[in-house]
Image (tube, helix red, strand yellow):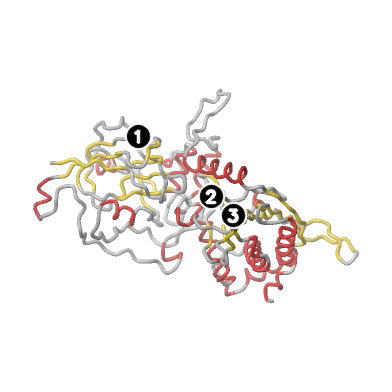
């Protein structure tokens, strides 16, 4: 019998720490190769870690909710020396494992991925393990770590946590203790945990009897516990304290870096968006867009790409020594998620058709809201849109995403009195705001750029030119 101390790996290319969100195993459980054994939260994403070893869990070294540095041992696995009789060293990852390959879904329906608050019409599927390939444990882990299952899975309401390292019942025994298992996806469980919601008390409305995001929020609202804190406070408390870690810490650092390194300048313009709203309505009724979400954000994205082509320096990067103008558009979309603000981007958006861009934006938003955005999806952005209109805001002065020189804010679109051909008529009106790095973008370029964006919102037919 030998023991292996499993260190926290770097799953985010340079991230230095992560929070232990939820253990999927307990002391005494047998753990298989590639089995997900813990859920961690980095500054960029929620990640499930698969095991690179086989054996029995001897000890959990870190409690849930604790933040540890990369390289810190978090788990002890006991391996049976007899298992190494085939020539493998005890505790070493297998060179091969006879596993079924994971099929790549051809469509959202086939993958089981669901829109937030809605379920898939297909039956729940069991998780399949990846092919294990030769290499070190860290190489195998790095290849498998970013994967997050897209299908709903059965989970059992957790028992009160025992002290770390204390004897706990095996997984099979814990499952047997519950006669009413709950079907919920990992991001839904995470949301329920954050809001203090007991999943066993939630009435599921998903098509397969699964708990949806709306179900959790509804239960939280009814229980008057919907709040953005991790640790419940007594009702009489005069203040709450929220630890600065994970995504919130990353957001704070990025905003300070951007605000105090790039001199911001902002400009605004009111726009008659009536034709955009009419265009969106026509696209929604088109067979080519069946099953694809179409919104004014899609037209805004196309308008931004069109304006970049006419004003290239708005799609650039400042490096102190030179200005790097990007001749491609990795379009960032600021997304508000239960974990905080993140900015994933659509790679090479300038090469996409309208339908392709609509599908990409929908997938990006869905992935972000479900907490599945991976670090690679947030790297390499060149310019960003923030849609504050969904919160009812007219406009704002957004802070630049670090490394970029322009960000555009789309305000709410609502009917207002507007002068058309000398007459006051009701029109759909919005306000577009933009912030720019004044080291790169002068006032005239910023103004022309925003005017170009506005011209597309006023007349989408210009996209055909």
- Residue at screen point 29% across, 64% down: 101
Nearest to N terminus: mark 3 or mark 1 = 1
Q: Residue 464 in the image: x percent, y percent?
A: 67, 76
- Of all residues, the one furthest to the front in this rendering is 321
Q: Residues within 10 Å of mark 1 (few under 14, many from 20)?
A: some
**For discs 1 and 2, the disc positioned in front in the rendered view:** 2
- Residue at screen point 37% across, 52% down: 153
Q: Circle 3 sits in a helix, a strand or a loop, which is it?
A: strand
Q: Is residue 309 above or below residue 381?
A: below
Check whether the beta carbons of the residues at disc 3 and disc 2 lie within 8 A of each other: no
Q: Residue 454 in the image: x percent, y percent?
A: 73, 62
- Of all residues, the one furthest to the bottom in this rendering is 465
Q: Is residue 214 above or below residue 103?
A: above
Q: Is residue 315 above or below residue 38?
A: below
Residue matched to label 1: 63
In three-dimensional space, the C-alpha distance between marks 3 and 1, rounded to whole angstroms, equals 42 Å
Nearest to N terminus: mark 1 or mark 2 = 1
Residue matched to label 3: 318
Nearest to N terminus: mark 3 or mark 2 = 3
Residue matched to label 2: 342
State which quarter of the image contains the N terminus. top left
Tell me which corner region of the image, top left, top right, bottom left or bottom right, holds residue 428: bottom right
**For discs 3 and 1, the disc positioned in front in the rendered view:** 3
């Amino acid at each position: 019998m030998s023991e292996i101390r499993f260190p926290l790996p770097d799953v985010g290319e340079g991230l230095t720490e992560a929070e232990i969100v939820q253990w999927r195993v307990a002391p005494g459980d047998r753990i298989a190769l590639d089995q997900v054994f813990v859920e961690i939260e980095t500054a960029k994403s929620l990640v499930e870690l698969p095991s690179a070893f086989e054996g029995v869990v001897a000890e959990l070294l870190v409690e849930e909710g604790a933040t540890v540095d990369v390289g810190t041992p978090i788990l002890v696995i006991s391996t049976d020396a007899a298992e190494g009789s085939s020539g493998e060293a005890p505790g070493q990852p297998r060179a091969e494992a006879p596993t079924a390959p994971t099929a790549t879904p051809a469509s959202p329906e086939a993958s089981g991925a669901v829109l937030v608050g809605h379920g898939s019409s297909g039956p729940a599927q069991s998780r399949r393990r990846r092919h294990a390939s030769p290499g070190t444990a860290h190489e195998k882990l790095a290849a498998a770590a970013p994967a997050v299952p897209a299908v709903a899975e059965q989970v059992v309401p957790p028992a009160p946590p025992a002290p770390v390292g204390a004897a706990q019942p095996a997984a099979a025994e814990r499952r047997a203790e519950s006669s009413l298992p709950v079907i919920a996806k990992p991001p839904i469980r995470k949301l329920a945990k954050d809001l203090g919601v007991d999943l066993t008390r939630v009435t599921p409305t998903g098509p397969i009897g699964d708990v949806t995001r709306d179900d959790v929020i509804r239960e939280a609202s009814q229980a008057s516990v919907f709040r953005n804190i991790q640790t419940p406070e007594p009702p009489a408390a005069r203040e709450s304290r929220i630890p600065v870690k994970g995504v919130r810490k990353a957001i704070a650092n990025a905003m300070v870096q951007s605000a105090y390194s790039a001199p911001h300048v902002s400009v605004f313009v009111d726009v008659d968006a009536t034709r955009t709203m009419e265009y969106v309505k026509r696209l929604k009724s088109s067979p080519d867009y069946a099953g694809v979400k179409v919104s004014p954000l899609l037209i805004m994205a196309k308008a931004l790409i069109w304006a970049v082509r006419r004003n290239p320096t708005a799609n650039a990067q400042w490096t102190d020594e030179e200005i790097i103008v990007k001749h491609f558009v990795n379009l960032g979309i600021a997304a508000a998620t239960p974990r905080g603000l993140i900015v994933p981007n659509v790679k090479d958006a300038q090469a996409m058709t309208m339908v392709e861009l609509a599908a990409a934006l929908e997938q990006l938003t869905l992935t972000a809201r479900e907490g599945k955005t991976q670090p690679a999806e947030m790297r390499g952005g060149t310019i960003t849109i923030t849609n504050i209109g969904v919160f009812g805001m007219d406009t704002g002065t957004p802070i630049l995403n670090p490394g970029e020189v322009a960000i555009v804010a789309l305000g709410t679109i609502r009917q207002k009195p507007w002068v058309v051909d000398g007459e006051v008529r009701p029109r759909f009106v919005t306000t577009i705001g933009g912030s720019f790095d004044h080291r790169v973008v002068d006032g005239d370029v910023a103004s022309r750029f925003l005017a170009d964006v506005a011209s597309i919102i006023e007349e989408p037919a210009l996209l055909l030119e």
